[in-house]
Image: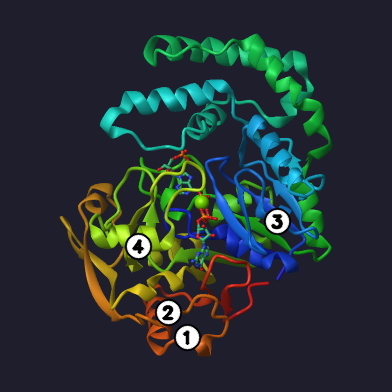
Amino acid sequence: MPAVVVLGAQWGDEGKGKATDQLSQHVDFSVKYNGGNNAGHTVVVNGEKFALHLIPTGILSPRVNPVIGNGTVIDLKVLFSEIEELEMRGVSCHRLLVSSRAHLVTPYSLCVDEGSEILRGDKAIGTTKRGIGPTYAEKMYRTGLQVQDLFDPEALGEKVTEIARLKNPIIKDVYRLDPPDPVQVTEELLQFSERLRPHVVNTSLILNNALDEGRVVLFEGGQATMLDIDHGTYPYVTSSNCTAGGACTGSGVGPTRIDRVVGVMKAYTTRVGEGPFPTELTGEVGEKLRQLGGEFGATTGRARRTGWFDTVVGRYAVRVNGLTDLVMTKLDILSYFDRIPVCVGYETPSGRTDQMPDYSQDFAAARPIYEEIEGWKGANIEGVRDWHKLPAAAQRYVEYLEEQVGCRISVIGTGASRENAIVRHKLV
Ligand code: GDP
Ligand code: IMO
Ligand code: MG
């Protein structure tokens, strides 16, 4: 199984980091293909907790070559502080490969992210303020900076000056923030160029050659299907293609080479930031789920919004990604509940449906229709690794979701540690 995509099937923080880390003994390359340091993937290895943002989780496994693909956006300051922190903890980063075509987050993008969120007021997206959206906007606007620009200081200076010419009037006069000085920005970027140079390669060529040799490549999605710029709950989304197609455009590996697409979903739902969330629980039960699941962001520390599992979202993720398998995480967290509601459809202004509404107004107004499934309250399933050791009610919950979303659940998470999982079907 040489090329496998692992991506978020809900609104992010499903446990993609843990899911990809678990596969790492069988993987030669792990590729981040979208997003930047808006991502936060927590991985627990031998009781030690790592929170990864820009660097693929494959870095934690010495046999894996971690790759930051062309579809990503890189804040160099953050990249090097992440490298330093990992190295201090004994994780070597010399194997890291970075695409010469990845885009760079600049102080201009950080200012625009900050300023536009403030200006939007109650219409704010609730971004991570890591400059992600504005950096992708620059890329599309064709004024962005790529990693390779770091190696031509004169041209870099000219490009930064041009960005300043276009952006500083807005930063100063509209957002009322201090505009960054282009000379200083250029100098800061150049400070990193020699440190980055040994890592910079043609990642598309390397990955395709690796696949030709039968090596295993794992594509590690950031964010998630419902945050995808095309398929998510626009405009309450991130600015990249988190869905399966993004693995191809974000790495330079064609779709005919992808063998398996794995969606990661929690046994319930969470969301950080603004935007519609039909199964959201705002009362005591939602708070209970948040506390039990430790639902606080790994990047911004914000409390995650919580709610029941939504099979409409599940079916949608299976469809738009062409999922072959699912990893369902955090089943252990549901052991507290007597009965567990599962959303099977919506009442919307356009009628009842079990498919994702195509119009955002319908989704924003959707009221969930629930089926209640019997829980397995009191049974501690944390750390269970054998399907047959799960209480019958927990097995039924998994099988019910599988049937509803139309995709097999191949792995079930029963705890945060690397080994806490039930593998029903091997993914690599
Ligand atoms: P990611 O962004 O998709 O990688 O997910 P995050 O790391 O942001 O959030 C997932 C959280 O759930 C992390 O704190 C993980 O350690 C934790 N986690 C992952 N899988 C499981 C599981 O099966 N059970 C429990 N209890 N925690 C899990
Ligand atoms: P991982 O990879 C959850 C959300 C933000 C905001 C929206 C846009 O850990 O699953 P952005 O800064 O990207 O412009 O913010 O997307 N968001 C995430 N939510 N997990 C993430 O990453 C996220 N990355 C961005 O909260 O609502
Ligand atoms: Mg996360």
Check the image and report above or below for 42 versus 108. Answer: below
Quarter holding the N terminus?
Answer: bottom right
Q: Amino acid at mark 2?
A: Val
Q: State the image coordinates of residue 223 (x, y, percent, origin top left).
A: 50, 50
First in sequence, mark 3 or 2: give its number. Answer: 3
Q: Are marks 3 and 2 in contact (CB under 8 Å)?
A: no
First in sequence, mark 4 or 1: give its number. Answer: 4
* Residue nearest the viewer, comparing 265 with 283: 283
Q: Secondary structure at mark 3?
A: helix
Q: Are marks 1 and 3 in contact (CB under 8 Å)?
A: no
Q: CA distance from mark 3 to mark 4?
A: 29 Å
Q: Is residue 105 found left or right of 295 in the rendered image?
A: right
First in sequence, mark 4 or 2: give its number. Answer: 4
Q: Is residue 284 found left or right of 381 in the rendered image?
A: left
Q: CA distance from mark 4 to mark 2?
A: 18 Å
Q: Are marks 3 and 4 in contact (CB under 8 Å)?
A: no
* Residue nearest the viewer, comparing 79 with 219: 79
Q: Is mark 1 within 8 Å of ligand 1?
A: no
Observer able to see residue 333 = yes
The residue located at (22%, 52%) in the rendering is 362
First in sequence, mark 1 or 3: give its number. Answer: 3
- Mark nearer the viewer, 4 or 2: 4
Mark seen at residue 398: 2
Check the image and report above or below for 143 versus 255. Answer: above
What residue would you read off at disc 4?
Answer: 289
What residue would you read off at disc 3?
Answer: 58
